[in-house]
């Protein structure tokens, strides 16, 4: 397994991380991801990950209303020291007026509850699951910095921020000498490359590593979706939650899948393995967070590393997946002499 530094921190993380959103399966939304609620099955998945060198496990308080954290915690019993745990807060978990957001009140209660469910005294990476425009950035970052000083959190990160959200937060941390976000958990895949327009250059400039969620495009790049074929029987796209996920034009998807098929045939790899490997060639990417419904799927995803695409294959995938940028990015691309592409 290859390990990379997480942003500007000294923490090394594996290029593949296990997403425990499949643990628990406590609601229709998360059943679309998977429903590993058996502790022995979860422990077996963790065993396989650790054997392969995948020691970063990602979850969140809202995944199956805390069940994901509980299952992951039990699956890691007796080997917590071998694992890195990433969890998140901010989204609503409860009916009270303060059971949502990134206020000091909510973050403190959320972290303490996550630690209890995980059965640990600290988390290695603590994410804000989304931006809270109702709470002052200074309150949020002061709270997160306190968690770090207390030893309950090792590193802080964010998820799903816009460029100005992230840059404002980094500036506040710098102003007061507080802990900075070292990572940004982002949606990025061959069928959705908007991350490259602003967040990737920002990540390069500010040393914020990308932890990529849904690197197979919400299940669209599994190799099972093609022109003229019905959706597979087992797919998150069959669940109602698909309407809340990223939308993709059919022709764009099929063009990318065609290119993936061609490269898969050349390399002898599967479509998802090629799609994951392509992401690992991109600037700022520290780790890809993948889930798995079963052991077979887990082992297939693990085989996405340990080999490399050729420059020609990367170029073919780049061309097939290119998307016209929105303003002001299309205008900036006309001035590449002083606005070069991220490398």
Image (cartoon, rainbow, N blue to C red):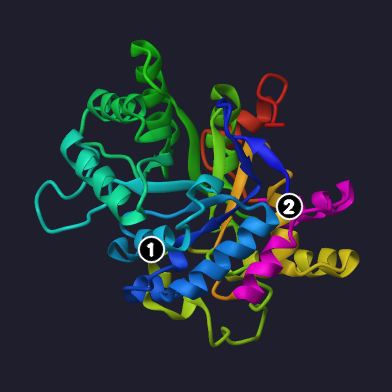
At label 2, counting other C-alpha atoms closer than 10 Å, the crowd grade (few under 14, some 14-19, many 20 or more) is many
Residue 282 appears anywhere in the view: no
Q: What residue would you read off at disc 2?
A: 278
Q: What residue would you read off at disc 1?
A: 68
Q: Is residue 273 left or right of residue 177?
A: right
| Residue drawn at 45 percent across, 58 percent down | 77
Residue 50, percent from left and from top: 62, 56
Vertical side of 143 occupied by 128: above or below: below
Q: How many marks?
A: 2
Work out whether residue 161 or residue 340 is closer to the camera in this orientation and state it. 161
Work out whether residue 179 or residue 130 is closer to the camera in this orientation and state it. 179
Q: Residue furthest front?
A: 78
Vertical side of 58 occupied by 201: above or below: above
Quadrant in which residue 263 is drawn:
bottom right
Residue 283 appears anywhere in the view: yes
Q: Is residue 7 left or right of residue 23?
A: right
Residue range (magenta): 295-322
């Amino acid at each position: 397994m290859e390990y990379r530094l997480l942003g500007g921190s000294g923490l090394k993380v594996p290029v593949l991380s296990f997403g425990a959103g499949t643990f628990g399966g406590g609601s229709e939304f998360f059943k679309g991801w998977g429903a590993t609620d058996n502790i022995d099955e979860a422990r077996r998945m963790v065993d396989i990950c650790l054997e392969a060198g995948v020691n970063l496990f990602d979850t969140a308080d809202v995944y199956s209303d805390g069940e994901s954290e509980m299952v992951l915690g039990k699956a890691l019993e007796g080997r917590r020291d071998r694992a890195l745990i990433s969890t998140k807060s901010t989204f609503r978990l409860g009916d009270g007026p303060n059971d949502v957001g990134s206020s000091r009140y909510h973050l403190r209660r959320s972290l303490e509850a996550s630690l209890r469910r995980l059965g640990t005294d600290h988390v290695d990476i603590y994410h804000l699951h989304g931006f809270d425009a109702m709470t002052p950035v200074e309150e949020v970052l002061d709270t997160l910095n306190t968690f770090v000083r207390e030893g309950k959190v090792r590193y802080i990160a964010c998820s799903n921020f816009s460029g100005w959200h992230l840059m404002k937060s980094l500036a506040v941390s710098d102003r007061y000498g507080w802990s900075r976000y070292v990572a940004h958990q982002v949606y990025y895949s061959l069928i959705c490359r908007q991350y490259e327009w602003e967040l990737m250059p920002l990540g390069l400039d500010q040393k914020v590593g990308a932890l990529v969620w849904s690197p197979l495009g919400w299940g669209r790049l599994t190799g099972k979706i093609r022109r003229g074929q019905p959706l597979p029987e087992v797919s998150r796209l069959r669940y109602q939650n698909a309407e809340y996920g990223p939308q993709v034009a059919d022709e764009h998807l099929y063009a990318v899948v065609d290119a993936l098929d061609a490269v898969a045939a050349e390399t002898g790899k599967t479509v998802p393995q090629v799609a994951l490997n392509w992401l690992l060639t991109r600037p700022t990417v520290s780790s890809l967070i993948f889930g798995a419904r079963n052991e077979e799927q887990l082992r297939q995803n693990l085989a996405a590393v340990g080999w490399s695409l050729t420059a020609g294959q990367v170029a073919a995938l780049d061309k097939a997946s290119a998307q016209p940028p929105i303003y002001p990015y299309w205008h900036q691309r006309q001035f590449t002499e002083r606005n070069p592409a991220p490398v």
